[in-house]
Image: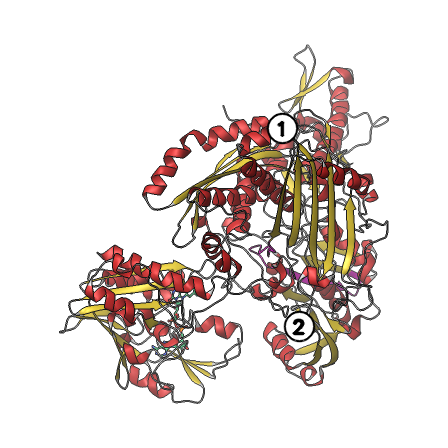
């Protein structure tokens, strides 16, 4: 780790101001950023902690029936408090990392980082969530722009995420045996007006919607409707799986998610 | 009734109280006033010529005490190798120099190039980043078969090639083996990889060097399994410090698994730098450094063939193995694929003719050395996979084929130079079949199939040679050390006693089990006995702990020393009781005169030894302290049979272990709970190797599995509740306790049954797959089921160090 200054504002406005400094960076749960700093792979001059900003924490339902989660809400909180409103999302949160990671890591950090194997991007994209920042609202479809890339501008903060709650949903995750992140995972959300499917872990382009499966499922919502199908695209090939295998798993995970709902 | 103390009791591990309550004393807990910190600048290039190392800018940075480079070590010895193997032509192996800091060339990612000593770890690291290193990159030598081809790039320019040795064993048998294969009714052959592993002890390595200018004494605190061995190697061969001026302390050590046997550069560096800087110097390895500097394990590529006659008797076996040494020879590296591997190729079978060929190869990778089992897992895996394959090819029951070929008469001299003293392989197989409930398997398979899963059952037998080893024998085989063990038993005036053992505990529970033995011998409470280990200043010269040798060799030395104590105590008792020495009996901590009610307590005798007022001073010295050295007459040969039952998810290739049974014969057992714990840990590592763990280099010699993000360690949730049994006991015939080693058995015996079970499951689903290399990952299983191209591309990145053919 290199030396850095740290600030702990209590409002979004103060945080945004603090982030105006040269090479300042937000610190949320630190579960991604702290290991990066320890490995000396990043050298921010100032960290702005989001952990003291109450307006960025907590869970509620808005008037439109959306589940709203503050950007600095931990995975553990979502696991406990979203259960009654959106069980599939609570279950996603419950399977991130281990208790230590869940008690620190946050939804805002996960979405800002947009790791190609992270869980929340699949949940947000499949739900058609809205990412709320200190300056605007971004539809999930516009927000994820490739591996570790999002629509966020420099210094822009994810303050809240609004999830439309589907009629039924399921997150099916096969883990990479070392990191226990998804090797490939599928989030299937069934709404009254159609089905959305998001795949994480598989593609070099990061999380993506598998539109072919969405169409098939919107016609007939059953695992059989996806028989023999798999997503195509520029799949990740690494120590844990070939591109071909990952492509195969997109079909398996999606069918299983559907079967769990249907 | 289970005993509540002494031999055979499951006494609770007394050391766990301090380990589990956070008051252990590990090397990193040692902080000496005025200590400075070292940071090693390590090569991020696998192979290259060091053209310059410019430390000028770094030297002026805040907190820097001194920066060392290879040039500072030109007059200093290199890291020695402790075992010289002679090749099949009678020539010694090729042995490259192994510098403390790189000289001239870098030969693996992680090799230290320079070392910064500074006031704080951060300052040392900052300065290390400011060192400017110029390396002219050379092609990396990674694949072993490519490495030994003509014209291959050489890892060491001054050696004739990358071949360390070409070992044939037993060379005289070679022609007879060839003939037996010509005459065979059936030949089964198999090519396989024994995957490279990283040991990953929970505690990374640490070294603290300290130098006392007033006395010119050096002290090294280090995470070692054998402090005396480090003192000898480092003192005599590297730094030229006589042993009486050098103390090596290995306090509590948080796991070793072999990788803390070896003498490493960082230990020598800290000792050297402490004197050069006249300050204590400390190094604590990060996990990232551990991956690229702790000696790795395994990494063999093997072709093995079995010849059988028309009645399915094994008639001959031959193997052809490439064994990776890495870039340099680690302390015991040459012995692992030879004397710890070739000598085990008979396994549990009476195969009359065996020929083993091993080519040890230098590559631009981290040195490879002993890791839990060391050579014996490699032998067991190839043999037990091959026997299973033969059974399948011949359409016979794999257990029946094994039983038919088991050795049943002991002692048994194998054709590969060792003599098994005792064993009963049918007994452990009987026990296993009962534990594994083979009869119920079909019903369980049906249930799995109803859930869309394939279920498989796999077994294997194993034998291993441990409790190393007779010194004169290993001397003939090339060891540059003896392998005896030592103990001093010091009885105090009030009857308590301290055993100072040359064995070292890095998690095995010696402080408990060793005390049980002495308690049993004297008949006193275990709490009256303290076990001291790990400090060359207060223990006799000992060889340390590895090769499952502690109770068999170290325990035997302790028994011998305790016998001397008892003999002398009886003399004192006979004086106190005014009886003849021959009539004195020791029972339950009291000496009595046979056939009378006259007795004297243990504590009265020990007091008399130190307050010798009424004492036969003319015949007997006062005091009660004895030392014994024990050199074993043979290895011990634990053996057994393991069974694994798996479920395979045919859609994803995921394997889950549903049941695992282990029937072991460890001879007499001192503490059954500790023995079960050792088996549990060994099984976790064996199953980890079979299903998850894999150390992978790419073609450029970059370590791809360099952190826990990519190196998969097994966790408790990946493992089943084991069934473990050690009730089959054929006591060792040549040590006083009748014990065999138990520390490595689990890791040695488990991988083949896991793979055998997976293949059995796949066959039940109509996939006749001959072999899948470890780790049997979901991708590999899925690919094997789909054959052809999918199998070839099993993982997106194929390990360059684990390709079968170039
Ligand atoms: C052992 C382990 C296992 C894990 N397993 C999983 C898993 O299975 N699935 C999974 O999805 N993840 C997993 N993670 C990652 C974990 O979910 C992280 O918590 C998450 O990716 C980052 O969240 P954080 O709050 O810790 O962010 P931080 O580490 O604090 O920040 C990450 C990045 O986001 C930026 N940032 C943080 N908050 C905001 C914000 N509100 N607005 C804008 N930018 C912001 C930071 O500047 C930084 O660049 C694992 C992590 C670990 C250590």
**Label 1: chain letter:** B
Residue at (80% x, 47% y) in the render: B479
Indicate if the residue with disc 1 has its beta carbon within 8 Å of ligand 1: no
Disc sitting over residue B311 in the figure: 1
Q: Secondary structure at mark 1?
A: loop
Q: Are marks 1 and 2 in contact (CB under 8 Å)?
A: no
Residue B156 among those drawn in magenta = no
- Quarter location, residue B56: bottom right
Q: Is residue B9 visible?
A: no
Q: Residues at marks 1 and 2, common chain?
A: yes
Mark pair 1, 2: CA separation: 57 Å
Residue at (65% x, 69% y) in the render: B109
Q: Which residue is mark 2?
A: B43
Residue B213 among those drawn in magenta = yes
Image: A137 above or below B631: below
- Quarter location, residue B766: top left
Name the foreground residue: A251 vs B659: A251
Tag in front: 1 or 2: 1
Q: Quarter of the image for the C terminus of chain B: give it.
A: bottom right
Q: Residues within 10 Å of mark 1 (few under 14, many from 20)?
A: few
Q: Which residues are magenta?
A: B195-217
């Amino acid at each position: 780790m290199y030396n850095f200054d740290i600030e702990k504002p209590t409002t979004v406005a103060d945080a945004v101001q603090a982030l105006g400094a040269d090479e300042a960076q937000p610190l949320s749960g630190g579960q991604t950023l702290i290991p990066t700093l320890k490995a000396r792979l990043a050298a921010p001059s100032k960290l702005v902690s989001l952990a003291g900003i109450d307006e960025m924490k907590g869970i509620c339902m808005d008037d439109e029936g959306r589940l709203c989660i503050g950007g600095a809400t931990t995975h553990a909180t979502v696991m406990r408090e979203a259960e009654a409103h959106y069980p599939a999302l609570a279950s996603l949160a419950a399977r991130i990392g281990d208790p230590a990671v869940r008690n620190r890591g946050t939804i805002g950090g996960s979405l800002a980082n947009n790791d190609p194997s992270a869980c929340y991007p699949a949940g947000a994209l499949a739900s058609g969530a809205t990412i709320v920042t200190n300056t605007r609202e971004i539809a999930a479809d516009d927000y994820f722009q490739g591996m570790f890339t999002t629509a966020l501008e420099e210094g822009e903060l994810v303050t809240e995420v609004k999830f439309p709650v589907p009629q039924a949903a399921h997150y099916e995750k096969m883990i990479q045996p070392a990191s226990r992140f998804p090797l490939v995972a599928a989030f299937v959300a069934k709404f009254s007006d159609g089905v959305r499917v998001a795949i994480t872990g598989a593609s070099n382009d990061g999380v993506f919607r598998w539109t072919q499966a969405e169409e098939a499922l919107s016609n007939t919502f059953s695992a059989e409707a996806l028989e023999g199908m798999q997503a195509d695209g520029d799949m990740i090939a690494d120590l844990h799986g070939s591109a071909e295998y990952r492509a195969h798993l997109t079909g398996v995970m999606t069918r299983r998610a559907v079967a769990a709902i249907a | 009734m289970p005993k509540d103390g002494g031999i055979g009791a499951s006494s609770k591990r007394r050391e766990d109280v301090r380990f589990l309550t956070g008051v252990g004393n590990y090397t990193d807990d040692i902080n000496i006033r005025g200590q400075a910190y070292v940071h090693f600048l390590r090569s991020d290039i696998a192979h290259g010529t060091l053209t310059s190392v410019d430390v000028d800018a770094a030297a002026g940075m805040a907190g820097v005490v001194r920066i060392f480079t290879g040039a500072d070590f030109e007059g200093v010895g290199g890291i020695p190798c402790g075992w010289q193997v002679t090749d099949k032509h009678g020539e010694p192996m090729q042995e490259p120099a192994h510098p403390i800091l790189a000289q001239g060339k870098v030969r693996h990612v992680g090799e230290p190039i320079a070392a910064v000593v500074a006031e704080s770890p951060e300052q040392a690291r900052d300065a290390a980043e400011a060192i400017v290193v110029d390396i002219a990159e050379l092609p990396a030598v990674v694949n072993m078969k490519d490495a030994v081809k003509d014209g291959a790039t050489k890892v060491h320019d001054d050696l004739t090639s990358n071949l360390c040795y070409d070992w044939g064993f037993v060379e005289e048998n070679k022609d007879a083996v060839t003939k037996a294969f010509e005459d065979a009714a059936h030949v089964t052959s198999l090519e396989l990889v024994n995957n490279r592993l990283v040991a990953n002890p929970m505690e990374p390595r640490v070294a603290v060097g300290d130098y006392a200018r007033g006395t010119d004494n050096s002290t090294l605190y280090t995470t070692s399994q054998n402090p005396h061995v480090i003192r000898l190697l480092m003192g005599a061969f590297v730094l030229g410090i006589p042993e009486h001026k050098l103390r090596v302390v290995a306090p509590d050590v948080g796991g070793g698994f072999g990788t803390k046997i070896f003498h490493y550069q960082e230990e020598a560096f800290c000792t050297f730098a402490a004197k050069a800087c006249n300050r204590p110097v400390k190094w604590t390895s990060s996990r990232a450094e551990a991956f690229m500097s702790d000696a790795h394990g395994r990494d063999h590529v093997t072709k093995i063939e079995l010849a059988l006659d028309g009645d399915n008797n094994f008639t001959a076996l031959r193997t052809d193995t490439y064994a990776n040494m890495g870039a340099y020879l680690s302390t015991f590296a040459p012995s692992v694929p030879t004397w710890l591997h070739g000598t085990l190729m008979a396994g549990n079978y009476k195969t009359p003719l065996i020929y083993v060929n091993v080519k040890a190869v230098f590559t631009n990778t981290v040195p490879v050395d002993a890791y839990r089992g060391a050579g014996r897992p490699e032998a067991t895996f190839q043999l037990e996979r091959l026997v299973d394959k033969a059974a399948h090819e011949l359409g016979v029951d794999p257990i029946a084929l094994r039983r038919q070929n088991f050795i049943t008469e002991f002692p048994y001299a194998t054709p590969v130079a060792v003599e098994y003293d005792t064993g009963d392989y049918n007994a452990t197989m009987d026990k296993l079949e009962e534990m594994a409930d083979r009869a119920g398997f079909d019903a369980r398979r049906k249930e799995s199939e109803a859930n869309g899963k394939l279920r498989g059952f796999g077994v294997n037998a194993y034998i291993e040679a441990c409790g190393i080893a007779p010194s004169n024998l290993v001397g003939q085989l090339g060891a540059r050390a003896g392998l005896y063990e030592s103990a001093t038993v010091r009885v105090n005036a009030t009857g308590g006693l301290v055993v100072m053992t040359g064995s070292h505990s890095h998690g095995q529970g010696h402080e408990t089990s060793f005390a049980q033995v002495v308690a049993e011998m004297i008949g006193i409470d275990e709490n009256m006995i303290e076990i001291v280990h790990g400090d060359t200043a207060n223990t006799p010269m000992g060889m340390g702990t590895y090769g499952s040798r502690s109770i068999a060799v170290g325990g035997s030395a302790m028994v011998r020393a305790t016998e001397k104590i008892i003999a002398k105590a009886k003399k004192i008792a006979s004086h106190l009781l005014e009886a003849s020495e021959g009539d004195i009996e020791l029972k339950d901590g009291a000496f009595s005169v046979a056939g009378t009610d006259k007795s004297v307590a243990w504590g009265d005798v020990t007091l008399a030894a130190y307050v010798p007022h009424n004492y036969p001073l003319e015949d007997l010295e006062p005091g009660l302290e004895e030392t014994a050295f024990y050199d074993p007459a043979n290895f011990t040969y634990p053996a057994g049979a393991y069974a694994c039952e798996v479920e395979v998810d045919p859609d994803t290739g995921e394997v889950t272990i549903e049941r695992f049974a282990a029937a072991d014969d460890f001879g007499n057992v001192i503490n059954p709970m500790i023995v079960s714990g050792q088996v549990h840990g060994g099984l976790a590592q064996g199953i980890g190797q079979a299903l998850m763990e894999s150390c992978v280099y790419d073609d450029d010699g970059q370590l791809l599995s360099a952190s826990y993000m990519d190196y998969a360690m097994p966790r408790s949730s990946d493992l089943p509740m084991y069934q473990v049994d050690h009730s089959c006991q054929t006591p060792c015939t040549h040590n006083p306790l009748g014990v065999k080693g138990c520390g490595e058995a689990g890791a040695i015996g488990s991988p083949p049954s896991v793979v055998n079970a997976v293949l059995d499951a796949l066959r039940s689903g109509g996939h006749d797959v001959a072999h899948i290399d470890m780790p049997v990952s979901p991708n590999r299983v899925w690919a094997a089921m789909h054959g052809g191209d999918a199998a070839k591309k099993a993982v997106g990145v194929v390990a360059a160090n684990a390709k079968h053919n170039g």
